[in-house]
Image (cartoon, coloured by chain):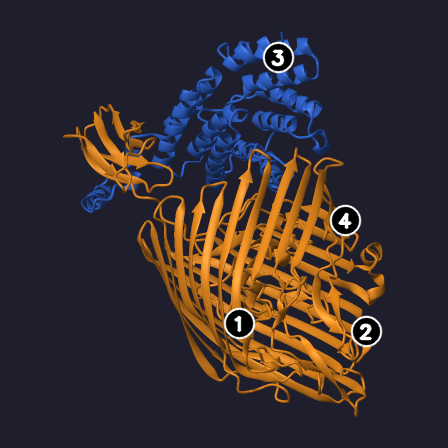
Amino acid sequence: MVSGTVRDPAGQPLAGADAFLLETLEGSLTDDSGGFRFDTHRTGSATLVVQKAGYLEVRRLVDLPLDGALAIVMQLAPIALEPITVEAGTFRLGNLPDVTLSDLEVVRTPGAAADPFRAIQTFPGVQSVGEGAGLFVRGGDISETRVLLDGATVISPFRLDTDRTISFGRFDPFQLRGIQFSAGGFGAEHGDALSAIADLQSVDKPAASELGVSAAIGGLSGGLSVDLSESVGFRVTGTRTDTDLLMRLNGRRDEFDVVPKGNDLSGGGEWAYRPGASLKAFVLVQTDQVGVRIDDPSHSGVYSSDGRADLVAVSGLDAFGAVGLKWGVATSGSRKDEDFGAFRLERDDRLNQARARIEVPVRPGLAVALGTELEHREADLAGSVPTASYDNAPDASKTVFSSRESGARLGGFGQVELQPSNVLRLLLGLRADRSTFTGRATLDPRLSATWRPTGMLTLTAAWGVFHQVPDPLLFEPTLGDPSLPAMSARHWIGGATWDAGTRLVRIEAYAKHYASLAARTRDGITRGGGTGTARGLDVFVKDELGLLGLDGRIAYSFIRSERTDPDTGRLAPSAFDATHTLNLVLNRGFGEWLDLGVAYRAATGVPFTPVTGAAFDETRGLWQPVHGAPMSERLPAYRRVDLSASVLQSFWPDNITVFFVSMMNSLDRSNVRQFRYSRDYSERIPLKTPFPRSIYFGVTMTLPF
Amino acid sequence: MSFPYKLVCALLLACGIPPQGLAAQTLDPGELAERLRTQVEEAKIAGDADALQQMVTLSRRAVTAFPEDALLNHYAGYALYCLASRSMETDTDASHALLEQAESFLERSVEIEPITESYALLASAIGMRIDGPVSAMTLGMRSGAAMDRAKALGSPNPRVRLLEGISALHTPRAFGGGHEAALEHFLAAIELFADEAPKPPLPAWGHAEAYAWLGQTHAALGQAEAARTAFEQALELEPGYVWVRDVLLPGLG
């Protein structure tokens, strides 16, 4: 007879645990009091195994027959070391302050226009600033979010990313296996980022060979996936975007001389040359153009932008015994020509990079990671900016510049991961970087802790120092400042996550302190030495409302942030300070073929510096604005409701066809994105959203072969 | 037991570590697989949920003792799959949780050795979790890929055709499913069952079940007599087939 009791670390009896002898498989399940009892004919040495989901397996050597009852204590299974990856249209939170998104969550997010970055904007910690795809995270500027693709930095992750146009992300959600978004407090492996990390992972080798075709009112796309063998496969996709028909349908064609258009060619492949080891490549080439008609007080004309971007990223992972290796080499390029009146900028950027990381599990509960990265950045800059920002006429006085800025950054990090108990995880990291742009080295210590006092509750805390080298344009000798140091930020984060399976609640509070910020004035002059703070609270709730068949998420962010205004040198609310941001996304499936979604987004208007008067400039014959206190007024509140529907059909065996339609800004609210002024600045004219009520529709189909 | 093995065992025991291979000295994985093959089928035919739960427990123990045995992983997945099928209509969440567990055992099974039935069951376990257009797009592709692997592994297999038929019954006609497509698969499965005799402990499940599904498909198509014949053939093979005897056959009226 073998008998005993099984309890959890708190001494509570565990029912349903399986206790058995490894040598005979005889055993029994524990009852409500945690007791087990079974007969065996075995004598002598044996191994008692006790198993229960969520707990570490117990193996104990026993000598049969037993003298008495056994007392077994089961420990909770360790906290997962990696954030849980999203699959099958559901998402969960990892044990780090990260949110993960699947490709289908991106596509199902109404109003996101199948743009991964716009879908990220519906998550907590991202402030609503305008209608573009930019990620303004916890008081940080768009440039403070580092975007990675398979670990490689993408220097220009947004297309049409200019002051005069609405930006879009460069990546198609179906190119991506998942996205890990960290709104702060990230580990020491990530350098050169002040605020956030959007870590995009490209798709693995295709599971089946298929052709895919998509046609929408804004473009055409065709793709080929080839599953060559169990271990090798690749994909190629080409897209032609032309919004002419879309703009005509939505009554906006007249705003453009050249409607937004572009071409994309992307591809990727994977070779899993042995279990746990693979080689992956991703290639992307994109072009885009736009010509938009603009009326400024000093000049009416066409703002034109012509851009091109490319990315080649090769990465691999392997293991040598217990030591894991991840490596990558990549080149990311971007060329952009902008022209409007006296303003002209031709900019050609390239970032070449190499990185490697090893992970060594020293012993249970202790792992060490070491890594290094080397980047070489080159920026060719040429153009002109008006001497006075209020006079942008083609014949206005202007400063002409032309230079090549190039430099390298060498970074390294070490990170220790400790799990002193099954409910506690500590991450201690240190990274060092040296940039030839700044000529200085920086040191970033980072700490984070995760404590799981109960099965459903997880408490997290993080602190760290973060540095980022300013944009090469700010080092340009004519208008820039070659002596700028790296910008820095300190993050403090504390939070709690309640995860009850279908319902998840996460609350996180944070504080950030900035130093050595660099920014450009209205006249394009670089100013360094800026400071700033950001404090806020993010709340996230995800639920599956089984009764109504709905699943949805609500994200609310509160923030107070301020920064040094480069024009006055005074601290003022930051331009990204949307005090309250609320996002509600609901989806409901009907049977196996129809999916409906609705998204509601509301945010406090962001601050701006008003023009309070004007003086007439006799020599130029135009009015010179007088600006009020920096960031002393706010735009009206932002509201938007988006609807979407998709219908799934199959027209022949193995075919999947998806028809989709979305109505953006369904209530046709005229959100104000900025103010422009009459020629004498006496009248303030709201510049309305570029997204009035708009309909977008299309179809995508696959054909396996 | 060789001296070096004894020495290693002695050292491991001295350190308080049970040697992993010790179980292999007293249990035979082939015998365990055969026991599971027989008893899982008996529990399924008897419609005995408790016995199926016991088989899940036993198969988990067997996999603990022999984690690298592909057939034991297969039967662990199959036992969970049978248990999940019973609760699919009454408790979908619990059923999906069991199917996810089945999926992990079956994935492990095919990692160790490409067993046709493991791939086919994997396809079915994934496919049964499809409950809407979104899951259809993700799980459908994975399920289809696993079924393709099963079909690519060799000669026609009756259990693959059986699972294809069940899948067709749960797939809208617009996506290549429907009763006619299912009927074709079940008839083909039955023909293949007649000619096969898998060597124990290889998977042999599904013969009577194919008649049960064939009968249901006939019934759905309004062919009551053909349905009755199919159910009776199922009972000829397995007289104690509770699902057919107590549910399907009386259901014909």
Give the residue at the far bottom of this rendering.
Answer: A619
Foreground residue among A257 and B62: A257
Callouts 2 and 3 close, C-beta under 8 Å: no
Residue visible at 60% across and 49% down? A584
Q: Badge 1 local density, few (<14 within 10 Å), some, or many (20+)?
A: many
Q: Residue A562, labelled with which disc?
A: 1
Mark 3 to mark 1 CA distance (whole Å): 77 Å
- What label sits on residue A577 in the rendered view? none
Chain name for mark 4: A
The amino acid sitting under disc 3 is Ala
- Which part of the image, by quadrant, shows the N terminus of chain A? top left
Chain B shade in the render = blue
| Callout 3: SS | helix
Between marks 4 and 2 in the image, the one whose residue lies nearer the viewer: 2
Q: Nearer the viewer, mark 3 or mark 1?
A: 1
Dot 4 or dot 2: first in sequence order is: 2
Q: How far from the left and from the top, in percent, is residue A340?
A: 77, 78
Determine the chain carrying the residue at label 1: A
- Lower sequence index among marks 1 and 2: 2
Note the chain letter of the orange one.
A
Q: Pointer 1 and pointer 2: residues touching (CB < 8 Å)?
A: no
**Alpha carbons under labels 4 and 2: distance apart:** 29 Å
Measure the alpha-carbon separation of dots 1 and 2. Answer: 34 Å
Which chain does the residue under circle 2 lie in? A
Is B98 situated left or right of A459 in this image?
Answer: right
Q: Pointer 1 and pointer 4: residues touching (CB < 8 Å)?
A: no
